[in-house]
Image (cartoon, rainbow, N blue to C red):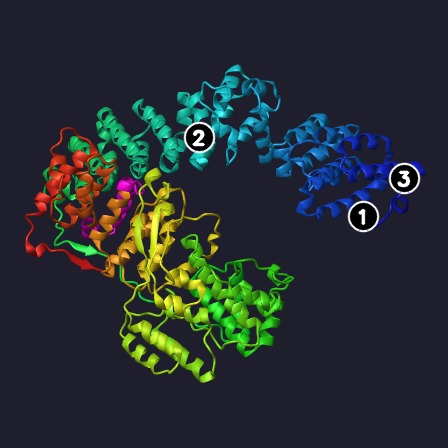
Amino acid sequence: MTGATVTETATASGGTAAGVEELLRAVRSGAHLSVQQILTRLDASGRRAALPLLKELRKDVRGWGWDRWNEQRKVQRALRLAGAGCHTGAAAAAAWIGSRDLADWGERTTDRVLAVLADREPAWLADVARRLAERPAVAEDEYRLVHTLVLRSGCATPTGEAYLRGWTREMASGRLLERLRSDPQTPVLVPYVIALTETPDRLTWSAGPGDDGHWPTALKTLADEGVLDRAALVDGCAARLLRGGRPRDLRFPLALLQLLGTTGEERRARIPDWLGMVADAPSPVAAHAQEVLAELALAGGLTAGQVAEMTGAALFRTEKKLVRAQLTLVGKVLRREPEAAGELLPVVTDAFGHEDTAVQERALALVGRHLARVDERVREELAGAAELLSPVHRAAAVELFGGAAAVDTGPYEEVLPPVPEPRPSAPAAETVAELMADLVPFARHPYESVEDFERVLDGVVRHAYRNREALVAAVRDTFAGAYWLEGRDHVSQSSEGVLTVLAALVGAVRPARLDIARRRLLGTPGCAHEALTRAVDARSWEAAWVVATAAPVPFLLATPTRHTGSVDPLVLVERLREYRDAGVEPLPVDLAQALLRVRKAGPSTAEAAERAAGLGTRAGTRLAELLTASEQLSPVLRLLPRGRDSRSGSWRLADRLVLAVREHRSIRKEFPPAFHWLGAEPAEITRGCSGYHWSGMRPLWPGVLPDDREALAAWLLPSVAGGAESEERGAAWALTALAEGDGPVGPAVHMALALGLGCRHAEDRLTAVDALLVLASRGELDPSLLAARLAELIADGTVKPNRLADAARTAAATGAYATVHAVLAGLLPGLLTAPKPVRGVGELVAVAAECVERCGASGEPAGLAETAARPGSSQLVTQARRLLAALGRSGDRTPSEAVQISH
């Protein structure tokens, strides 16, 4: 250790100096068990003398490497104990004890820290306790330390979130009821625990009510015994449920409230709260509030207006159970109070637009039973709402309301979104100052889009060629202190995109390191993520090598001209012409990426091919050959069966999906190693991800193959599959690029779309619906092929029919009924005639029936009549009968009622 010595620091007697030296030896050796004994022999002056030496030793120990981790932890425990005993100020002592580097997660030093603080004044201990309680990590993980200091000092019990979490963990470590009953903190802390936004794990992990560790049961027992104030518990639970939150966090206050029960007076006093819960709370909470309000309503405790408000809130929800329960309640209320029909029936018509036709039927029947109780004005209002009903109920509505409910729909018109217009990419910054303005926000989020990444990368290369010194100075000034500018060779096996290029520009990475990285030979990738990331990495390494050497290029060839990442062929020809005239050889990776991005289908393709051939350069010849070739790079897809019979032995689709890569001579001979996975040699990629992949680069992956959607979709399938068979969120992100990109659409794109429509999370299914509608509007959707892919995935168990039905219903509701029906018409025969019943098919049949009723499509799926003829009233049988009836009606349509399409 450097710095002050014992003799320089200690101003007391020689005995004090010896004691300080003994303390330091014990701390350096990590003998924290001996530190307490040594501290008892040190007087106040000796402890003051030791303190600066302990601080310097702590600083030294903090810098030790992982190879000394065990030794470091021992010394830090000893340091914690020694510093606690030597500090005289409460603030400094709390900061030392609660510091992260000296934290004792195993609580090995807790008792000894308490021992060395035993002789301190209560007021001093109270100050330390308060300060430690304000440190979340200490208050929760070292709850016993803080709690003991609170008891010794007699200060107020802390009520911070971390202390509450520590307390709940401590209570749950033994017999819960007995510990709660014996802890004087219980009456103080329980209301604060109930109010927590995030319920502590110990309360959500509780077993059933009969288990000793069940918190709601224990708290109810204490309320019955008078230890806890029951009214305060009810108030706290109701207030927490009204605030809302995740279902996980509301489970505890809901269970406690249900066990405590509520009196009639308590229910009436909180009517606005219950109404709010019915409207906005998660399903279990809303169901409880609905039950409470129903009891009040049937006892005459609610006005008609309050029942109407409750009904409007309940019918707006998506849970069919809540909707059905509310319609039943309204029927009971109207039997008791017929005069309330004028106020309640208009709200009931909100259910006319429900997605479930059975709910619509119940609502219509309820209105019909009490229609005689309303005046003409309300009757007209009810008749006007009949237009919300599905066509299957229109006849019943006309019979009930007369001609006022008749709806003249006219010829069906399919509504699809407009075809997305290609958006030109913004050019690179003209000046160094403009480039820096682009780089500052880009450095914080460097992988948000292909367009931004490529524009900034091209800007750096351009200005490194034009005005290198000004660019280097601007980068050093703008990003002073950035980690990627400190030292040399900070980068690892993978690049960091444009940040690696900037680091190379200012000399933070040796050119030899860059040359090795850009020339690295790469074998068959382990998964699709690795393959696509290689291409992005190789482009970054090459650009970094260019700006770090004396052989720069004036600009990059592969910079996109469209937001999708594609390059206009005529623009690429002109870029190659400028290279030829300047005597510059194209960079291998840059040229390869440009050739993969060039648009091959368009009005200027033939002209561009002719001009490219006339350049007289090898790069021009390669471009001309590419524009006139018909070869596709997409691999052949094959799906292995699930489980042990599979060659992969896996249940995950990502592991069972085989990408059979075909050999392409041009890839093998002309493309750099970073692109050899596209077909330098025949290969079968049969593995999912074998390890961790940083997904930050994934927005750049579509830019590798923007003009070959089939190939891109094939390599992205494992990513999309994660959303259908696991909890992965955001898995359908690539479908937007696939829908808006260029190139033919075939099996791979339709497989990706099928997986997206079956994703676990609603937002991913919505992304897939948008992609489906865009493909349909571009005339690129093949309903039969999509149906075949969906049937394969449903039979495989990867896609669940209920999720697909939700996506199909959403797509149809936009006005694309004919498009959705075309897909379902190809899917339903296999599901209806399957040897083993497929769970959830009834929902798909319901969507198909809605589509036929709206668009008048025809064609009876195989197995439909047999299904409709079955006895019973299950959803599948009921909806099969509905679909069969709708198909019978649609067969009577005239040719003038043919489907029209509107964008």
The tag on residue 1 is: 1
Residues at marks 3 and 1, CA–CA distance in whole angstroms: 17 Å
Q: Give the secondary structure at mark 1.
A: loop
Label 3 with label 1: CB-CB less than 8 Å: no
Q: Return the mark for residue 532.
A: none
In this view of the protein, which residue sits in the foreground, 79 or 301? 79
Q: Which residues are drawn in magenta?
A: 795-822
| Mark nearer the viewer, 1 or 2 | 1
Write down the quadrant of residue 401 in the picture.
Answer: top left
Magenta stretch, main secondary structure, is helix
For marks 2 and 3 on the same chain, the one whose residue lies earlier in the sequence: 3
Camera-nearest residue between 747 and 687: 687
Q: Amino acid at mark 2?
A: Arg
Q: Is residue 442 above or below residue 716?
A: below
Give residue 312's position: percent from left, percent from top: 30, 37
Asked if residue 626 shows in the view, the reply is yes
- Answer few, some or many: residues within 10 Å of disc 3's Cα (few below 14, many 20 plus, some between 14 and 19): many
State yes or no: discs 2 and 3 in contact (Cβ < 8 Å): no
Residue type beneath disc 3? Ala
Q: CA distance from mark 2 to mark 3?
A: 60 Å
Mark 2 highlights which residue?
Answer: 251
Give the answer, above or below, for where 436 lies relative to 387: below
Residue 340, magenta (yes or no): no
Residue plotted at (17% across, 37% down): 879
Give amino acid for label 1.
Met
Badge 1 crowding class, 10 Å Cα cut-off, few under 14, some 14 to 19, many 20 or more, is: few
Q: Residue at x 57, y 35 (%)?
A: 161
Closest to the camera, between mark 2 and mark 3, is 3
Q: Nearer the viewer, residue 353 or 562?
A: 562
Where in the figure is residue 165, as x and y percent of width and height? 57, 32
| Residue beneath disc 3 | 17
